[in-house]
Image: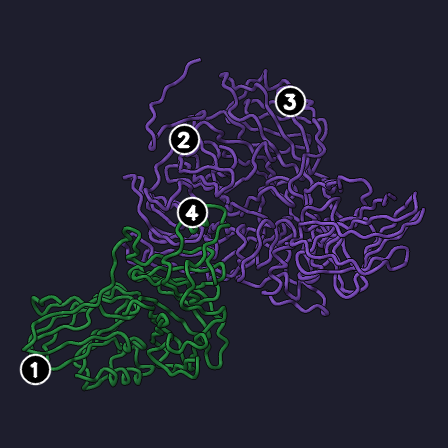
Chain colours: A purple, B green
Amino acid sequence: MKYLLIPMVMGFLVSALARENYSVERLALPEDRDLNGQVDGLAFLPDGRLAACFPFGKVYLYDPADATWALFAEGLHNPLGIVAVDNRTLIVSQRPEITRLVDEDGDGRADLYETLCDDFGLSGNYHEFHFGPVRDAKGNLFASLGTASSGDGIRAEVRGTFYFNSERYYNDPALTPEPFSEMRAAFNRRRPGRMYSSVPYRGWMIKVDREGTMIPFASGLRTPNGVGLDLEGRLFCTDNQGDWLGSSKLFHIQEGRFYGHAGSRAWEEGFRGHPLATPVDTLDAMRTRACVVFPHGIMANSPTQPLVDSTAGKFGPFAGQLFVGEMNRSRIMRIMLEEVGGALQGACIPFYDGDGLGRGSNRLAFDASGALWVGQTKHTWAGGSGLQRVTWDGEMPFEVQKMNLTGDGFRLTFTEAVDPVIARQTQTWKMRRYFYRYHEGYGSPQFGKTDVPVTDVRLAADGRVVELVLAEMAAWHLHELKIAGLKNVDGRALANTFMVYTLNRLLNDTPPVPENQRAGAGRVQLVQPGLWGRGAPVSRRPGTVAKKHPLPGVHEAELATMQGAKRAGNSSGFYGAGFVDFQTASGSYVEWELPVKAPGPYHLYFRYALQAGERPLKLIVNGREIGEPLPFPSTDSWSTWRDQVAEAPLKEGMNRIRIESYGDSGGNIDSLRIEGIKEP
Amino acid sequence: MMALADTRLELGVLPGLKYDIRHFVVRPGEAVHIHFKNNDGMQHNLVFGQPGSREQILREAIGLGADGPARHFVPDSPLVLCSTPVIAMNQEAHLAFSAPATPGDYPFVCTFPGHGFLMHGIMKVDARLPRQVERNTIELVEKEGGVITRPVVVRAFLPHATPAAIAVALPGGQHYIWDAGMVHLRAVWSEGGWLDYGTLRRHLESNGKPVTAFPQTPHYLEGAAFPFAVEGASPAPAFKGYRLVHGYPEFRFTFGGIEARELIRLADTGKGIVRSFTLTGVSSPVYFQRPAGRPGQVSSSAGHWEGDRLRLRPAEASAFTITILEPKE
């Protein structure tokens, strides 16, 4: 094996590494102690300079003519995208607002930091990122607002209406909203679901028109890190695998549509109650499906900005298609879309993989020469850092240029004529299908994995178009194609051989979505709006596996009979599927019915958690109150579980063991364990 | 102080409604050429008047009413010696005149509504004094050796504010938080220095979780409630951004139909701040509520206090300052 030795100069190596017909080089960033190498936004000015924004809130301008950087603006809060309006004016999305930066006096630095839109909420939850903006031909701006993470609470002061102590949330005239200051601590303990929207328009795409009016545009988004327009002005955004997203997605965003993440429903006009109380069937019927799904772990874990190839051929044979970055691996993807049954759907395929490209490709921009500039970042997640430039050598790459659905399979259009012998062999084409489940849980395995035999191959006369005939056509399934050993007529291998087509609709007679593609219809029972301080809305932590108590003789409370108490799971450290949360101060109970073989005295161990205070409960066995009420003192946290021990006689056969509130609510009850008291 | 080589002067504008010249000295009767450059974000003019006439000229300028803009807010008055038109940002005006024959302190002032209470200086006509010009100054040196010598603006999650807050360090050791979410100043401190750079940096570069705290308890805190009120109107404050004026952010916001600007600079003593407000569109009295029980700490250049509530008539509200001083030990 031969190695090509490249002389390395630490720090400012500019080495061109390449895939076929494309090469990538790394560019030096400004020397500034406030920078850490990560690049969070890119845009080209009309005069050819590049505007780049950086995590510390700075914006620099790079002049390719003399390779110099000049500071343009500073003091921004996590700017994550730039629109260049003219050579003196930029528009950035930063956490709290969309801001216009204007260099009024022409000295090269912004003087005016003008707020164009701050009509959305901020709870202070770290995960409430603000992505964008993009600007359409009419001058409208679009930006997307990330939801909050259940791994973090809210701050003592928030901007915007707080949903979870609003009257709309309580949806019950008998309940008076608690003051924010009093409910915040309880809210921070019992956050409503995995990713949530507690302040306006979190989980929404917003539109800001030329007059500065904000229009809530579309909902159902989770962490939509990437907004883009195609050449026809259609709006797209990516969203990241997680709750309600079995895998990461590309959405075609249209006004008024809902894209599947339940949290954002809080800000639908007229919506009342808890967003997670919506039955999954309803959500599934409401949602607009992704036009492209990126299979997790295979294609992309965190897709980023979609950028249309606006180079009219200066970047190769992909004009008008979207490129999409990917955070977790050194990959940029390409999207091939078509309209089927009135909606866009299509395929994703790697475009640039490794070969010198860094990880964390988060922001993309084409310069006037048609080179693709790539800003890389991570912000503690998987990713990378730096600024790179991808250029085309002008020679035709051998690639799948288009992938289209046909009546009985797919049509692939290649950039060059394929080797007809290899192409005609059905074993060249390996197709399988699967789907990701739509549910509140975090991500989804692949379900329904089925190999789909290619039964016939039709090759067009020019050798560039191949039609694959499939044994079976299945709507609402991803179709993953692997091409093995295909060469062009000159014997050159196909540059990218793996692609996934999101087959939602067939050309004709698309059947309804199978019911097994969604899950969690019973979820609604776990969500009952109430006051946060006591018996608050509850949510099981999706994805947690039920953990069995290590000792025998344990009876889970959540499986027992209860009144004035609810099953819950919004804590940690419990065994089984959850625990029981007392709702009222008097007459609420949990009651176990347990068969006992040997009559006699038993120890009863009630496993419970109580953050503060003392919440005594009466013990009633077979209808008779036993001794003094059990004290149930504080365990110091809702996730610290201890046993309250009692002693009671049990009879042979079925016994009813009840703990009941009589003046104060109870703690959270996990289980009852009984143990016979051995006579000495 | 520097000797004046001739009677040609360059006059500019500093943040906070100030000409960059405090006073200058000329000989009686000599020719004076003033090159007035408006390097400020606001509109200004330059009006010279008879000794002691500044306030009367301003009253007469307000008296122009609806005719004011067409007449560049210059009253037709024997008190006015000469004047420039109103000029916008980056415009220039030249003023040439003969100095009065009578010695005295001749004021110059901006008669643009609301500016003249703060924006003025003195031309001393005196044959006995050396020719000289004394300028107002603002330090504009880059940050060196950890000492803040220019205003530093940082947006991050900050204490005692909504998540949409702005922290500013002023050269001279006063620091403040201006809350864009609640649309007003929330805290001023000097003890303990500027916010911890490492925590700020981690907040901005990581996922946003680490949040900085005050290094020491601020000497001034405002609650979440918006402090301004307008008679007969709901304040409904809205943040509109800021303009950097010599590096100092001049915040822009609206409330009750009023467009407001606020520029904060160090108090002359260095032990506090001066908040310069410019309000346009004021037609009813405006009120400002200061925190309770701190009358000695919070004072104003105009209006009168009704307890902790400052009442400003429309003419007073168009430009005024509120000074916040560190409490005395």
Looking at marks 2 and 3 on the same chain, the residue that comes earlier in the sequence is marked by 2
Which residue extends farthest top?
Answer: A1
Which residue, given by chain and number where applicable, does mark 3 sit on? Answer: A457
Q: Secondary structure at mark 4?
A: loop
How far separated are the C-alphas under marks 3 and 4? 51 Å
Of tags 2 and 4, the one toward the viewer is: 4
Residue drawn at x 35%, y 40% as measured from the top left: A29
Q: Circle 1 marks a residue in which chain?
A: B
Residue placed under numbered mark 2 in the picture = A24
How many residues crowd mark 4 within 10 Å: few (<14), some (14–19), many (20+)?
many
Does the residue at mark 4 contact the one at mark 1 (Cβ under 8 Å)? no
Residue annotated with mark 1: B101
Location of the N terminus of chain A by quadrant is top left
Q: Chain of mark 2?
A: A
x and y percent of residue A670 in the render? Answer: 75, 49
**Residue nearest the viewer, comparing A235 with B35:** B35
Q: Residue placed farthest to the right in the image?
A: A652
Instruction: Look at mark 4 in the image and give the residue it sits on.
Output: A55
Q: Earlier in the sequence, mark 2 or mark 4?
A: 2
Q: Marks 2 and 3, how far apart in space?
A: 36 Å
**Between marks 1 and 2, how big is the CA–CA gap?**
76 Å
Q: Which of the 4 image quarters holds residue A597?
A: top right
Residue type, numbered disc 1: Ala
Q: Nearer the viewer, mark 2 or mark 3?
A: 2
